[in-house]
Amino acid sequence: GEVLAGSAFERFHESFLASRAAVGDTLHYAAVLPALPARGWMQVLVRTISGRIGSMTVDLEDVR
């Protein structure tokens, strides 16, 4: 697949990190993704500052 990169990713990344909000004992982040292909899969990988890694794969047709 393709890795989201370039200025579109940088804007998403900055917006995502700037959205940090404490909710109880957890932190929540949110941002609007740049335009994505109409079909295919998107894998989201997240690494915490403690080194834990989580991932989720989404069928893009399910989020349209």
Image (tube, rainbow, N blue to C red):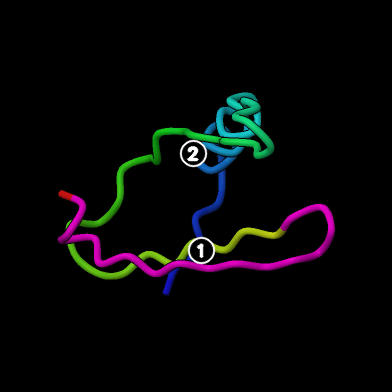
Question: Which amino acid type corresponds to the residue marked 2 in the rendered image?
Answer: Ala
The stretch of residues the image draws in magenta is: 48-63
Q: Which residue is mark 2?
A: 8
Quadrant for the N terminus, please. Answer: bottom left
Q: Is residue 37 left or right of residue 52?
A: left
Identify the disc placed on residue 11: none
Counting residues from the start of the chain, the first of labels 2 and 1 encountered is 1
- Give the quadrant of residue 45: bottom right
Query: Circle 1: is it few (<14), some (14-19), or many (20+) Cα within 10 Å?
Result: few
Q: Which residue is mark 1?
A: 3
Q: Total label count?
A: 2
Rounded to the nearest angstrom, the CA distance separating label 2 from label 1 is: 12 Å
Query: Circle 2: is it few (<14), some (14-19), or many (20+) Cα within 10 Å?
Result: few
Question: Which amino acid type corresponds to the residue marked 1 in the rendered image?
Answer: Val
Residue 11 is situated, as x and y percent measured from the top left of the image, at: 55, 31
Query: Which of 13 and 1 lies nearest the eye of the viewer?
Result: 13
- In the image, what residue occupies the spot 38% across and 40% down? 34
Answer whether labels 2 and 1 touch (C-beta < 8 Å). Answer: no
Residue 56 is situated, as x and y percent measured from the top left of the image, at: 45, 67
Instruction: Report helix, strand or loop for mark 1.
Output: loop
